[in-house]
Amino acid sequence: MEINYVFLLKLLLGLFSFSSLGRADPEPLNDYCVADTKHPRDFFSNGVPCINPDHALASHFATSALSEPGNMNQFNFNVTLTNTNNLPGLNTLGLVLARIDIAVNGLVPPHAHPRASEVTILLEGSLLVGFVDTSNRLHTQQLRRPGDCFVFPKGLIHFLYNTDFMRPALAVSGLSSQNPGAQISSVATFTSNPPMPDDVLKKGFKVTGQDVIKIRRNLGG
Ligand SMILES: *[C@@H]1O[C@H](CO)[C@@H](O)[C@H](O)[C@H]1NC(C)=O
């Protein structure tokens, strides 16, 4: 019997789109599910339990959490996120917003969000942004003007670098999950708890034991 390859391909594509691969957060069953931030969490679900919808207020859907920059970290950046505590109305909606402050010549080092794509809009300063795809190709762009945007596909390693020596940069990102997660590649590999075996790092990065000690110390591990 002759195999109909086109049909087979369509069938496979169909199966993939129904599988859980790349699926967004679960669809909410209600208009909203304002997070119950008052009561202690004694059970855990996928998301946060919600208050009685009759008690929802407009203020549950507003926040000033992004109005101030946070404190700079060792890489000279800070990310402030909305979450179900500072913006309870966000619960189950499948997104968060991030305020990103990057000091003069600061770097958000290569990192990945396992559960979200991210779209970044530059508000002040300028940024060199980029991601590496799974074929190891680097895609970079210089964001120069307020309003310039860039999108980082879900799960791919990316960075934001303020190449400017005079002006700090301010950007806002929307992420396509209520809980995007973040792993900074260098920090996750060199300062995990408990630490990865030195031999794994030596072989993985083709460096010496001294290099491992140095990098770990530099990263505060
Ligand atoms: C940003 O600043 C806040 C408040 O100063 C701090 O709690 C948080 O850990 C910082 N986040 C990062 C990614 O530096």
Image (tube, rainbow, N blue to C red):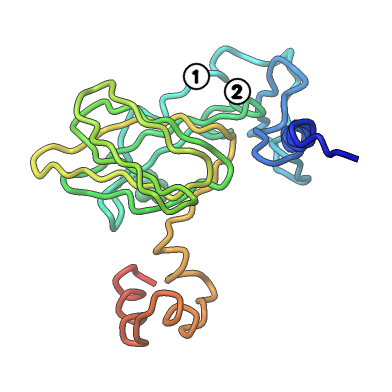
Q: Quadrant of residue 148?
A: top left
Q: Nearer the viewer, residue 45 or 28?
A: 28
Task: Residue at 66% x, 24% y: name it.
Answer: 34
> Residue 33: percent from the left, percent from the top?
70, 23
Marked residue nearer the N-terminal end (1 or 2): 1
Q: Residue at x 31, y 53 (%)?
A: 73
Residue 62, numbered label: 1
Q: Residue at x 46, y 29 (%)?
A: 174
Left or right: where 145 falls relative to 135: left
Residue 30 screen position, x and y as percent? 75, 18
Identity of the residue drawn at 50% across and 33% down: 175
Of the pair 101 and 138, the residue shown nearer to us: 138
The C terminus: image quadrant = bottom left
Residue 63's place in the image compared with 133, above or below, is: above
Q: Is mark 1 within 8 Å of ligand 1?
A: no
Image-quadrant location for residue 171: top left
Question: Horizontal placement of 211 versus 185: left or right?
Answer: left
For the residue marked with disc 1, what is the amino acid?
Ala
Rendered location of residue 20, percent (x, y): 74, 40
Q: Nearest the camera: 195 or 189? A: 189
- Residue 212 sits above or below residue 30 on the image: below
Q: How many marks?
A: 2
The image's mark for residue 89 is 2
> Which secondary structure lies at badge 2?
helix
Mark 1 and mark 2: Cα distance apart in space = 8 Å
Secondary structure under tag 1 reads loop
Disc 2 marks a residue whose amino acid type is Gly
